[in-house]
Amino acid sequence: MCPLCGWDVLVSYLICGTLHSVDQYLNIKLTDISVTDPEKYPHMLSVKNCFIRGSVVRYVQLPADEVDTQLLQDAARKEALQQKQ
Amino acid sequence: MTIQHNTGTLPSQEKHLVLLRDGRTLIGFLRSIDQFANLVFHQTVERIHVGKKFGDIPRGIFIVRGENVVLLGEIDMDKPCDTVLQQVSIEEILEEQRLQQQAKQETEKAKVTALKDRGLSIPKADNLDEY
């Protein structure tokens, strides 16, 4: 579906899981989730899959070794140049 | 895997849990969801967590506006969940919550006074969002 699907991501330093899908609003569907601090957030003990509304997500941490940083930097640089013109 | 990709009505054998922006947790049978994440819940229960205790308040049928939704999860009946949590009565959990809110307000007041003494001030957060 998208090249990032199947990666393990950490959303807003709270919820870790496998990225199942993303949509146009950047809503995130995660499977096999785990909460980083289960004592602070006990609600999620029996939840395995979840849907996270894109509008509330502040950060998504991706596995560093799966990302080609050179390619990313080049693409970002090109994008910035295009936007300037 | 029973993740729903559609919008509209769902076969609702599984209970769903929704976290709202104001910090509330609602649990119930999800009857419908649309592209804005507006939700219709059936046999809804509002679950209040304080420390290791929790309490359920029955709320009936709920319609949640999508902008208030943080997270929607499927409750897995097989996963062992109540091992650490202890269910208490509604009155008790409301009392615990009141005490927790009171304690939070007191620490906040102490922080503000301490800062004021040092000539600093933090602008108060106007939004009531927890997440």
Image (cartoon, coloured by chain):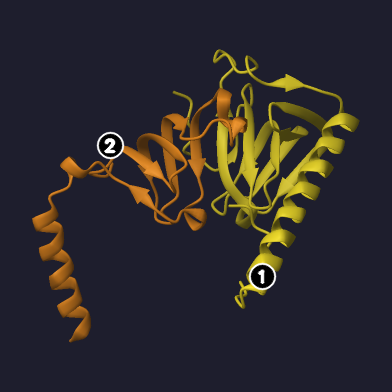
Q: Quadrant of the C terminus of chain A?
A: bottom left
Judge by depth and name the residue closer to the eye, A80 or B29.
A80
Do we see residue B59 in this rendering?
no
Residue drawn 54% across the image and 43% down it: B7
Residue drawn 87% across the image and 30% down it: B92
User: Based on the displayed image, in which of its 4 quarters is residue B43 positioned?
Assistant: top right
Residue drawn 43% across the image and 39% down it: A29
Mark 2, Cα crowd under 10 Å, few <14 / some 14-19 / many 20+, is: some
Residue B4: x %, y % from top left = 50, 34
Residue furthest right in the image: B91
Q: Which mark is residue B124?
A: 1
Judge by depth and name the residue closer to the eye, B8 or B54.
B54
Residue A30: x %, y % from top left = 42, 36
Residue drawn 41% across the image and 53% down it: A26
Which chain is represented by orange in the image? A
User: Based on the displayed image, in which of its 4 quarters is residue B80 positioned?
Assistant: top right
Do we see residue A76 in this rendering?
yes
Given the image, on which type of amino acid does mark 1 rest? Lys
Q: Relative to residue A13, is residue A70 drawn left or right? A: left
Same-subunit check for callouts 2 and 1: no
- Residue A70 in the image: above or below residue B81: below
Q: Quadrant of the N terminus of chain A?
A: top left
Q: Which tint is chain B?
A: yellow
Mark 1, Cα crowd under 10 Å, few <14 / some 14-19 / many 20+, is: few
Q: Relative to residue A31, is residue B28 drawn left or right? A: right
Judge by depth and name the residue closer to the eye, B118 or A77.
B118
Chain under disc 1 = B
Q: Relative to residue B64, is residue B37 drawn left or right? A: left
Secondary structure beneath disc 1?
Answer: loop
Residue A51: x %, y % from top left = 50, 40
Instruction: Give me the C-alpha separation between circle 2 and circle 1.
Output: 38 Å
Residue located beneath label 2 in the image: A7
